[in-house]
Amino acid sequence: MSTSSSTAVEKNFKREFLKIVFVVFGVLLICFSIFFLNHRENNKYIIETLEINGSAKEGDALFKINCVGCHGITARGLVGPDLHSITQRLNDKEIIKQVTGGLTPPMPSFEIDPVNMSNLLKYLHSLE
Ligand code: HEC
């Protein structure tokens, strides 16, 4: 009698345990797929941007609208750092991440299409 009731408890415990394992596994799977899809989307954006040969003049105009408030009208730095020779310190991929990522507040993340991102890159290269 006592042994049969303990196996019932054991069975119940096993079922609960399996349930938890399944839930944890499911949540992890969802997290991984979101991360993977996000990563692939970002990479697609970067590859697309790097394939375009942007215009420094257009990039200059974009910079004047979006960036001078913090980086200064000649990009010599204000709230944000001087961006001359930035292309020697950061590669294009890192600069794209800096501009679109919002990883270093107070600099905001910019939603910018690949053509304009490429223009901005060309402009930053022209500052060397
Ligand atoms: C609200 C202010 C602000 C605006 C607007 C802004 N930035 Fe920044 N930016 C910063 C600050 C502050 C940093 C330094 C962040 C850090 O490293 O902690 C920075 C860093 C950077 C860096 C990296 C510099 C380095 O030495 O590592 C780049 C590149 C850059 N900004 C480009 C841009 C571009 C291009 C734009 C316009 C599209 C822009 N930023 C707009 C504030 C700003």
Image (cartoon, rainbow, N blue to C red):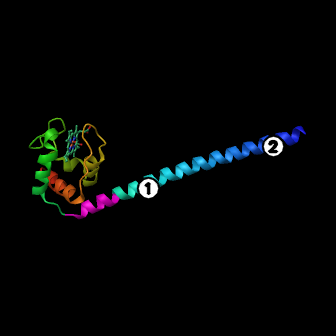
* Residue 8 numbered tag: 2
Name of the residue lying farthest toward the top: 79
Image quadrant of ligand 1 equals top left
123 up-or-down from 105: above or below: below
Name of the residue lying farthest toward the right: 1
Residue 76 falls in which quadrant of the image? top left
Which residue: 84% across, 40% down? 5
Q: What type of secondary structure mainly makes up the magenta span?
A: helix
Which residue: 25% across, 61% down? 50
Q: Position of residue 9 (x, y in %)?
A: 78, 40
Q: Position of residue 124 (x, y in %)?
A: 16, 51
How busy is the neighbourhood of tag 1: few (under 14 within 10 Å), some, or many (20 plus)? few
Q: Position of residue 120 (x, y in %)?
A: 17, 53
Q: Is residue 104 left or right of residue 127?
A: right
Q: Is residue 48 left or right of residue 68?
A: right
Q: What amino acid is at disc 1?
A: Phe
Mark 1 vs mark 2: give the one in front: 2
Residue 119 falls in which quadrant of the image? bottom left
106 up-or-down from 109: above or below: above
- Residue at disc 2, CB closer than 8 Å to ligand 1: no
Which residue: 87% across, 42% down? 4
Q: Is residue 46 magenta?
A: yes
Of the image marks 1 and 2, the number of the one nearer the N terminus: 2
Give SS at disc 2.
helix
The residue wearing badge 1 is 36
What span is colored magenta in the figure? 43-52
Q: Image quadrant for the N terminus?
A: top right
* Residue 97 numbered tag: none
Q: Is residue 24 magenta?
A: no
Q: Position of residue 62 (x, y in %)?
A: 14, 51
